[in-house]
Amino acid sequence: MKGGKNIFSSSEHLSTEQILNYLRHSLTRKEMHEVEKHLADCELCSDAIDGSKKLEADASLMKITSELQKMARKRKMVRRRIFSQIELISLFAVVFLILFLIVVVVVLFWKK
């Protein structure tokens, strides 16, 4: 670049590692102060920080969305059962009642 300054020069801007450590809050107080001082004067690095935060937020939303979709699929599969527990209990009660009535009728007619 002739006459202009290299905006990607490592000496003038934060490195990827510095940005990530800043976002993870894993810098010392002095390092944090230096990064924040740099961010106050450097629009490019400030935008990089904002973009990184947005990417993290988007990744979190995608993870949450994925988990919700898994839960919805799981619930849908549970609902696909032929009978629920209450329906099965009711069905067994009706079958038992019919069998009981058949036995009673057979016993009553057998005595005659």
Image (spheres, rainbow, N blue to C red):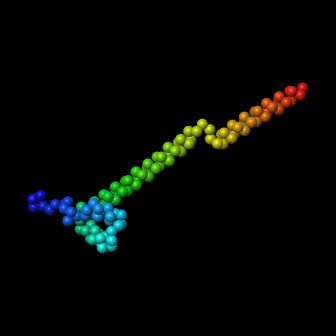
Quadrant holding the N terminus: bottom left
Horizontal arrangement in the rendering, residue 99 relative to residue 31 (left or right)? right
Q: Residue at x 34, y 63 (%)?
A: 23
The answer to whether any part of residue 110 appears in the image is yes
Residue 38 figure quarter = bottom left
Q: Residue at x 36, y 66 (%)?
A: 25
Q: Nearer the viewer, residue 68 or 21?
A: 21
Q: Is residue 87 above or below residue 9?
A: above
Residue 80 figure quarter = top right
Horizontal arrangement in the rendering, residue 25 relative to residue 37 (left or right)? right
Q: Residue at x 36, y 64 (%)?
A: 24
Q: Nearer the viewer, residue 33 or 51?
A: 33
Which x, y percent locates residue 57?
38, 56
Which x, y percent locates residue 102?
79, 30
Horizontal arrangement in the rendering, residue 15 relative to residue 86 (left or right)? left
Quadrant holding the C terminus: top right
Which x, y percent locates residue 74?
52, 44
Q: Is residue 84 above or below residue 98?
A: below
Q: Residue furthest right?
A: 112
Q: Is residue 106 above or below residue 65?
A: above
The answer to whether any part of residue 40 appears in the image is no
